[in-house]
Image: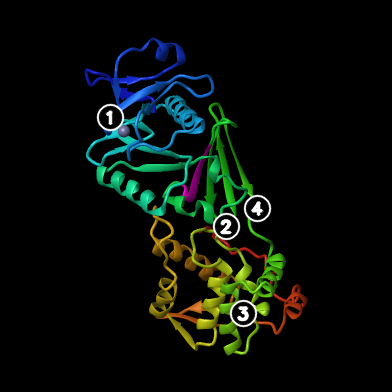
Amino acid sequence: MFVALDAGQRPVTLRDHEQAKALVGDFVCPACRRPVGIRNGRVMPAHFYHLGPPCAASEPESAEHLAGKLWLMAYGQRRGFKPVLEQYYPQVRQRADVVWQQAGRALALEFQCSPISLERLAERSEGYRRLGVPVVWIMGKRYFARQPKALQAKFLAWSRRHGWHLWFLDVRADRLVLWQLAQGLLVTWYRPTASRRFRQATGPLPTKAALGVATALRHREPKAMALQAASATQHRNLAGVPWLVHAAPTGLIGLPLPEWQLRAWWLLTFDAAPDIKKAAEAAFWQRFAADRTPLVSAGALLAAVAAQWHRVLTASGAWQSTATGWQWRQPPAWYPTLEAKLAAVGREPAPTARPRNGRA
Ligand SMILES: [Zn+2]
């Protein structure tokens, strides 16, 4: 950490090696009031460290974490905020890595470089909620990946401005990175002087996804096998699951099952029903609510997946709404085999077709 209290209880912020070298006296941690020392080596910026074990308000500090906090300070300043380093909130015994202030409002930034449990993430977020301070969790390099997956699920956030999203800070590349999960991935790089936005393909194309179903069955993946068993009781073959289950997925993470599997379970539940009642349909999705996303409600996540599936069904002409729910016009076709499914491409409505207004 960069901020400690001196003998007179005044906060002292370490700024550089020279200043740190000149400091004398005893310092304590602003959170636990236990003694801290100054580490002033060559590799890391000068920083305070607990002489004993670190307290609960502190996390193990790596060079990346220290550098990231300074990066967020400088970037906040550039963006017109008044940034505060390591703001300590005694009411909840939490120390924010950086707080950006503007016009009497505060935004806490947590730069997470080390592992963190779901429970701790939820607890700390709840602390900020009690304070009335919005918090943004920003992942460090431990969490970098090419595509969103289970690793980042606990950091999944939603906002009116960004929709479903994830934040990363790549200190070495000098950029803050926003991933917006909106049927694929919209990536924004925020650099100190410029930003760049681009779309990145995610997930396999439908044909590859169809082959993936067969692969999952060949490898006897438990979730796929459970779905295959349920399909078999309806004299269907999961390898021939309708093309629509692969069409325009939300690509959301933190779900208990892959999105195509949720859709396949949905079809097994409803595709033979004469009509589909809203309440039964909503109850179907609720069964899959799982506590994997402490920053967003599991219900809201499933509602987004459900809404997108509804759009896919509507856009394909498979069903239409009624006063109480929906009824089938032409339920999507199951195929006896993977081969039959692949052979049907071209004769079917294109499986790649994206519904209009298809944003999750
Ligand atoms: Zn402490």
Determine the CA span between mark 2 and mark 4: 9 Å
Contact (CB < 8 A) between labels 4 and 1? no
- Relative horizontal placement of residue 336, taking residue 301 as reference (left or right): right
Q: For the magenta stretch, what is the residue range? A: 162-169
Examine the rendered structure and indicate whether residue 351 appears above or below residue 5: below
- Relative horizontal placement of residue 14, taking residue 240 as reference (left or right): left
* Image quarter (top left, top right, bottom left or bottom right) of the N terminus: top left
Q: Main secondary structure of the magenta part?
A: strand
Query: Which of the two discs, 3 and 1, sits closer to the camera?
Result: 1
Examine the rendered structure and indicate whether residue 21 appears above or below residue 310: above
Instruction: Give amino acid for label 2.
Output: Gln
- Which badge, 4 or 3, is on the more N-terminal residue? 4
Is residue 167 a member of the stretch shown in magenta?
yes
Query: Which of the two discs, 1 and 2, sits closer to the camera?
Result: 1
Determine the CA span between mark 3 and mark 2: 21 Å
Number of other residues with Cα within 10 Å of mark 1, as a class: few under 14, some 14 to 19, many 20 or more: some
Residue at image mark 1: 34
- Residue 263, position as x, y percentages in the image: 55, 73
Q: Nearer the viewer, residue 107 or 140?
A: 140
- Which badge, 2 or 4, is on the more N-terminal residue? 2
Instruction: Give amino acid for label 1.
Output: Arg
Instruction: Give amino acid for label 3.
Output: Pro
Query: Which of the two discs, 4 and 1, sits closer to the camera?
Result: 1
Q: Nearer the viewer, residue 96 or 236?
A: 96
Determine the CA span between mark 4 and mark 3: 26 Å
- Residue 83, position as x, y percentages in the image: 37, 27
Residue at image mark 4: 201
Residue at image mark 2: 183
- Residue 209, position as x, y percentages in the image: 67, 67
Number of other residues with Cα within 10 Å of mark 3, as a class: few under 14, some 14 to 19, many 20 or more: many
